């Protein structure tokens, strides 16, 4: 086992869903530590703006709902960024959510499952073989406290995060005999674009939603947690980390 930590200058990290929220904050936090960050999502304009301000960062168009987009992701990268050390599988949403099951659009439900579960599986499947070949890598998934307990009108979103909880545990078990590390971060309520996207991009409704909670986290708080788990020495795996606002715990 190499005793060099994974969070070192020049390491390569792929962050999905980096155009906003937790993904963007994670890209910033990793780049600040000298990591070369591949900022991936669908909105390439936003990614380019983000990457332009981060040393060593690269913007990559990626739609995790598109199998070919995921399969080809490494081939579409500059050669020096193809050996990915860190995957932060963060892209996710709840578009059309917070509704009683029968009152939601079944295609919205299906897309939520596709992005939050199948999308994570696709990205992991694209990146993990290289990590295994090098026997070096850390996969971080974004679960949620909604993956531990179900809230009212959260049947589908919670189902996706319960799936991530199980999938991440399964990955850790699969690679227990290797030096790969696998961590699930389970955030509580975090103020991002997530709520507005849920309500068809209605920013005011998104803001008002967060105001109904006594406390919320910022995206940077979750990025800090991700940096913490990546910064552990090679013999230490933080398997799961639940991060909640102090006054909401
Ligand atoms: P956000 O601000 O809405 O950002 C979501 C990101 O996901 C965006 O960059 C979006 O980029 C990307 N994305 C969505 N669909 C995609 C697709 N098909 N392909 C590629 N990228 C896609 O939300 P966030 O709060 O940062 O959420 C990040 C993760 O944290 C999610 O997995 C979420 O479930 C989880 N989480 C959030 C909270 C919270 O309270 N905010 C709590 C627990 C867990 P494009 O639109 O440019 O593709």
Image (spheres, helix red, strand yellow):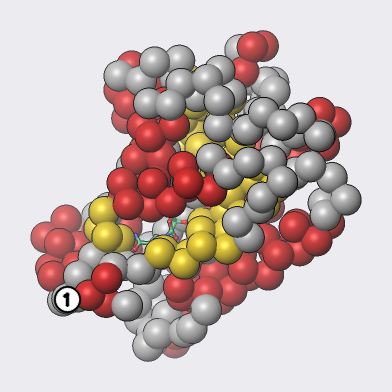
Give the residue number, with chain letter if any, for mark 1.
214
Q: Is residue 232 left or right of residue 83?
A: left
Residue 43 versus residue 113 in the image, above or below? above
Mark 1 closeness class: few <14, some 14–19, many ≥20 residues within 10 Å? few
| Image quadrant in which the C terminus is located | bottom left
Where's residue 128, x and y in %?
75, 40
Q: Is residue 117 visible?
A: no
Residue 19 vertical placement versus 236 (above, below):
above
Residue displayed at 40% across by 85% down = 151
Q: Residue at x 51, y 37 (%)?
A: 15
Compared to residue 168, the image places residue 71 above or below, namely above
Is the CB–ligand 1 distance for label 1 below 8 Å? no
Q: Give 143 or 222, whichever is nearer the viewer.
A: 222
Q: Is residue 49 at all visible to an observer of this figure?
A: yes
* Left or right placement of residue 211 versus residue 97 in this view: left
Q: Position of residue 221 (x, y in %)?
A: 32, 52
Q: Position of residue 122 (x, y in %)?
A: 68, 47
Numbered disc total: 1
**What secondary structure is marked by label 1?**
loop
Considering depth in this image, is 86 or 104 the residue closer to the camera? Answer: 86
Q: Position of residue 70 (x, y in %)?
A: 65, 37
138 relative position to 44: left or right: right
Q: Residue at x 20, y 62 (%)?
A: 206
- The quadrant of the image that shows the N terminus is top right
Picture residue at 39% right of the left edge, 15% below the top: 55
The quarter holding residue 83 reads: top right
Q: Is residue 109 above or below residue 80?
A: below
């Amino acid at each position: 086992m190499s005793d060099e930590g994974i969070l070192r200058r020049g390491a390569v990290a792929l962050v999905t869903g980096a155009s906003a929220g937790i993904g963007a904050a994670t890209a910033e936090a990793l780049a600040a530590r000298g990591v070369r960050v591949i900022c991936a999502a669908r909105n390439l304009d936003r990614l380019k703006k983000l990457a332009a301000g981060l040393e060593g960062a690269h913007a990559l168009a990626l739609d995790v709902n598109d199998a070919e987009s995921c399969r080809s992701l490494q081939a579409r990268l500059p050669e020096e960024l193809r050996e990915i050390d860190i995957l932060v599988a963060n892209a996710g949403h709840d578009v059309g959510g917070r509704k009683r099951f029968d009152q939601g659009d079944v295609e919205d439900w299906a897309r939520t499952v596709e992005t939050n579960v199948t999308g994570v599986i696709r990205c992991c499947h694209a990146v993990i073989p290289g990590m295994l070949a090098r026997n070096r890598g850390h996969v971080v998934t974004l679960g949620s406290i909604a993956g531990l307990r179900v809230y009212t009108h959260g049947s589908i979103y919670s189902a996706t995060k319960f799936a991530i909880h199980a999938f991440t545990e399964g990955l850790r078990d699969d690679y227990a005999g290797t030096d790969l590390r696998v961590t699930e971060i389970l955030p509580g309520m975090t103020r991002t674009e997530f709520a507005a996207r849920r309500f068809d991009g209605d920013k005011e409704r998104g803001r008002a939603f967060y105001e109904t909670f006594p406390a919320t986290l910022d995206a940077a708080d979750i990025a800090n947690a991700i940096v913490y788990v990546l910064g552990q020495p090679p013999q230490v795996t933080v398997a799961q980390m639940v991060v909640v606002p102090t006054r909401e715990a």
